[in-house]
Image (cartoon, grey):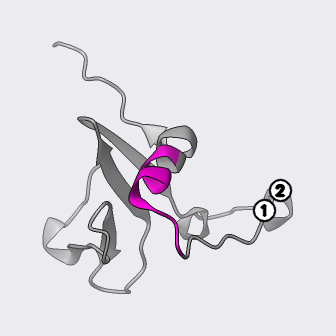
Amino acid sequence: MWVADPSQSGEYRFGTMTADFHVCKTCGIVPIVTCVIEGVRYAVVNVNTFDNVDRSELAETPSNFEGEGIESRLARRRRNWTPESPSTPD
């Protein structure tokens, strides 16, 4: 991931301090959230920030993470979020 103007990007962590919400300082949108679990960075993207998405192709389900413990939260992220690809040597 790269940001054209890093000065316009901020990060926010909620109470559990387990994920970084990358926030656009111009519009306030969160396009990506990252989390490091056992040395591996995982990410989830906000599809609502993409151009030309056919919403009829999306499967939306309600979610409620209230009361979820940290271990359960990290296990869910490990299962459902995308791990960072290892760098390849030049």
Residue 68: within the magenta? yes
The residue pinned by badge 1 equals 54
Q: Amino acid at mark 2?
A: Glu
Instruction: Give above or below for 31 relative to 1.
Output: below
Give how far across and how far down residue 54 sits, in percent.
Answer: 78, 62
Name the dominant secondary structure of the magenta segment: helix
Vertical order, 26 against 42 (above or below): below
Element type where label 2 sits in the image = helix
Residue placed at 49% from the left, 52% from the top? 72
Q: Locate residue 53 relative to residue 21 in the image: left or right.
A: right
Q: Are marks 2 and 1 in contact (CB under 8 Å)?
A: yes
Identify the residue under disc 2.
57
**Residue 10 pos. (x, y %):** 21, 74
Q: Nearer the viewer, residue 43 or 90?
A: 43
Q: Quadrant of residue 28?
A: bottom left
**Which region is colored magenta?**
67-75
